[in-house]
Amino acid sequence: MILFIGVVGAGKSVQGRYLSDLLGFPWISTGEILRQHIAGELREKMLRGDLLSDDDLYEVITPILEELIGTTEIILDGFPRTIAQAEWLERFIERNKSKVSCIIHLEADEDEVTERLLKRGRPDDTKEVIVNRFNEYRTKTLPIISYFEENGAPVIHVDGNGTEQEVRERVTKAVTDLGIHKA
């Protein structure tokens, strides 16, 4: 399993989708899944930039992971976002006799990311929501990097600034250098 972790707007989905096409591995974007499958109060919470509860996420992601795990490498973007979710994912992976091949940590400048998000124009891409997402990322998601490093998973720090093509080249080189190849 290849995990993409980074602040909102760092390019996780763009690069995850690209890597999926390049390597022939399924790509799972929790953001896209949630935007398509949640409504009501949960949707409002997400649109404010708040993280959904762990149980809400597990309910959505478990059937998808169960369908794919063990059959091929999986590219997972946007999950886990907290230490508790990282611990849950590790238990899930162990139960299913799989492993984390690497974590790609897309690091991007907040000013550049803010500009990208405002151009993207989703209803939840307002300055207030973006600031909230940055805070959530710093306090809840960023500690996951150390957690995985301490547990022996290879973490690749990739500069997510620049053009889509520049970041794509960095991601491709990082994965190739790690020895991950086409399915």
Image: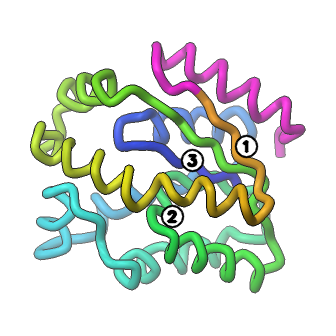
- Which of label 1 and label 2 is nearer to you? 2
Q: Is residue 83 above or below residue 165?
A: below
- What predominant SS class does the magenta segment belong to? helix
Work out how far the residue at label 1 is from the one at label 2, CA to CA, in angstroms.
22 Å
Circles 1 and 3 in contact, beta carbons < 8 Å: no
Residue type at the position of mark 3: Phe
N-terminal-most mark, 1 or 3:
3
Q: Nearer the viewer, residue 116 or 140?
A: 140
* Callout 3 secondary element: strand
* Callout 2 secondary element: loop
N-terminal-most mark, 3 or 2:
3
Work out how far the residue at label 3 is from the one at label 2, CA to CA, in angstroms.
9 Å
Work out how far the residue at label 1 is from the one at label 3, CA to CA, in angstroms.
16 Å
User: Residue 67 placed where, x, y %?
Assistant: 64, 74
Q: Which mark is residue 4?
A: 3
Q: How many neighbours does mark 3 have within 10 angstroms: few (below 14), some (14-19), or many (20 or more)?
A: many
Residue where numbered disc 2 is placed: 80
Residue type at the position of mark 1: Gly
Q: Which residues are magenta?
A: 159-183
Q: Nearer the viewer, residue 55 or 75?
A: 55
Residue where numbered disc 1 is placed: 24
Q: Quadrant of residue 46?
A: bottom left
* Callout 1 secondary element: loop
- Which of label 1 and label 3 is nearer to you? 3
User: Residue 91 placed where, x, y %?
Assistant: 68, 82
Residue type at the position of mark 2: Pro
Q: How many neighbours does mark 1 have within 10 angstroms: few (below 14), some (14-19), or many (20 or more)?
A: some
